[in-house]
Image (cartoon, rainbow, N blue to C red):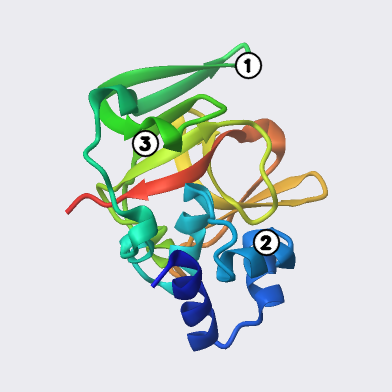
Amino acid sequence: MKVGDIIKSLRKTHKMTQADLARKLSVAPTAVSAWERNENRPLMDKLTVLAEIFNVPITRFFETEEYDLQPVKESDMVELPIVGKISCGAGEIAYQEIEGYEPTLNQWVQGGEYFYLRAKGDSMTGARIFEGDLLLIRKQEEIENGEIAAVLIGEEAYLKRVFRSNDTLILQSENPKYPPIVCPPAEAKIIGKLKTIIIKL
């Protein structure tokens, strides 16, 4: 079974049309169609969202000959910092309290600057993010409505689903026991977009 067949099967199990799935992924329906015909394959960031939508481990999409993993060479990897604290002065983001480095596939981190945060607490369990998981973040200040991002409030970095409403940021947890955080953009700085979750058992 190829990755497109897996996506098609999961989509039908969840009673979604290709258009429904495309909307959730912020892609064109033609992209979903191409995946399901095995003419193209989704990149890692889309696979991460697909796993979240269908509530399956991301490894589900690797159970295919297309993703038959070859031995990884050292040259295929890059060491990225696991950041314990982030500060922002004069608009510049600085990493502090680096607790270590995580080997990461080069193909995951093309076209940008990346770092890891470690998940704390249980506010994002609905997005399958649990305490101790490593969160691969792409450093960027702009994201689409509804995407999960790392947001700096004071000296604390929060991982939330972010929505903009007029001049207000709404930071939504994925656990109903936590109310949304509502604040003006001046009090919260988006520092990066969640790209991949590395589950730590």
Which of the image's four quarters has the N terminus? bottom left
Q: Residue at x 66, y 42 (%)?
A: 143
- From this view, report whether residue 23 is shown above or below residue 158: below
Find disc 1 in the rendering and name its residue: 91
Whether residue 47 is visible to the viewer of this picture, yes or no, is yes
Q: Residue at x 31, y 65 (%)?
A: 63
For mark 2, what is the residue? 31
- Image coords of residue 139 (percent x, y): 54, 29
Q: Would residue 88 appear left or right of 133 to someone viewing this image?
A: right
Q: Which mark is residue 43?
A: none
Picture coordinates of residue 30 (x, y %)? 73, 65
**Residue of label 3:** 117
How far apart marks 2 and 3 lie (CA) works out to: 31 Å
User: Label 3 sits on what residue type?
Assistant: Leu
- As helix, strand or loop, the secondary structure at mark 3 comes to strand
Quarter of the C terminus within the rendering: bottom left
Q: Secondary structure at mark 2?
A: helix
Q: Nearer the viewer, residue 192 or 56?
A: 56
CA distance for labels 3 and 1: 20 Å
Give above or below for 14 relative to 88.
Answer: below
Closer to the observer: label 2 or label 3? 2
Q: Is residue 5 above or below residue 98?
A: below
Up the image or down, 111 lies above or below 67; here it is above
Q: Nearer the viewer, residue 48 or 61?
A: 61
**Tag 2: amino acid:** Ala
